[in-house]
Amino acid sequence: MSKHGEDTDDGEHSHGHEEHSHDHHQHDLESLGFAVLTVSSSRSIDEDAAGDAIVEAVESAGHEVTVRELVPDTYDRVQDTVNRFVNREDTDCIVTTGGTGVTPDDVTIEAVEPLFDKHLPGFGELFRRLSYDEISTKVVGTRAAAGVANGVPVFCLPGSESAVRLGIEDIVLEEAPHLAGLARRDESEADEEDETDAE
């Protein structure tokens, strides 16, 4: 029987939550390389407060920004840039800012989602729940999203500095080490763990 279903001395069925929660984080990466992409046709990298906020938060948490770029709101440029970031050896996580609204030139989600092997709907749901306290029902206009592309977690945040700080500080930096570690896990290692859990 697996450790998740051992019987305790008093005969009750234990779910092994303490052991499981410890094992749950064994793949976490201690230090991540972040790629930061600002999507905007109206500002330059020198006046990119949202991008600056991401860099500041990432570095304050002990991680590294390995690449940072700004591209205009065009589907091809956004998709090509994120795809290039995903394939960099020094990139463990990608954060984009901008282009998640509902205007005709907000194309970040449309450009990035086709790259996802797995979607992480909980990110957008949690971001909107936390944002509600700040912007009330206006949260329905943000399409913040996340997923995993080629083993790299990608988080798409709105373009405002306050939204970026909320997303990066309250969610991304909390979960990125865990998600990046799991997403990059070796397939043979995953198979071994599945076999162990099935015993």
Image (cartoon, grey):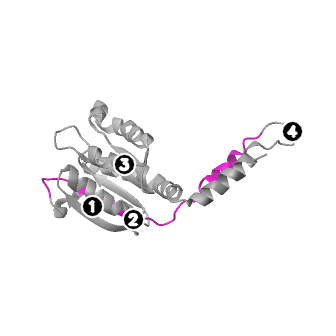
Q: Sequence order check: which comes first, mark 3 or mark 4?
A: 4
Q: What residue type is labelled 1?
A: Asp
Q: Where is residue 68 in the image (x, y as percent from the top left)?
A: 28, 65
Amino acid type, mark 4: Asp
User: Which of the numbered marks, if any, corresponds to residue 162?
Assistant: none
Label disc, if present, on residue 52 of the rendered structure = 1
Tell me the distance, in whole angstroms, between the alpha carbons under discs 3 and 2: 19 Å
Disc 4 designates what residue?
Answer: 10
- Mark 3, secondary structure of its residue: helix
Residue at the spot x=21%, y=43% of the render?
106
Mark 4 or 2: in front is 2
Q: Which of 4 and 87 is in front in this view?
A: 87
Asked whether the residues under the numbered discs 3 and 4 touch, taking CB atoms below 8 Å apart as contact, a structural biologist would say no
Residue 91 numbered tag: 2
Q: Which residue is drawn at 26% across and 35% down?
A: 141
Mark 3 or mark 2: which comes first in sequence? 2
C-alpha distance separating marks 1 and 2: 18 Å
**Measured along the vertical axis of the image, is residue 34 above or below residue 166?**
below
Q: Do the residues labelled 4 and 1 touch (CB within 8 Å)?
A: no
Q: In which quarter of the image is the N terminus?
A: top right
Percent across and percent down for residue 190 are 61, 55
- Give the spatial CA distance, label 3 vs label 4: 45 Å
Q: Which residue is drawn at 36% across and 58% down?
A: 94
Nearest to the eye among marks 3 and 2: give it: 2
SS type, badge 2: loop
Q: Is residue 176 left or right of residue 82?
A: right
Magenta run includes residue 38 = yes
Q: Earlier in the sequence, mark 3 or mark 1?
A: 1
> Which of the numbered marks, if any, corresponds to residue 167?
3
| Magenta residue check for 70 | no
Please tell me which residue lies in front, 146 or 31. 146
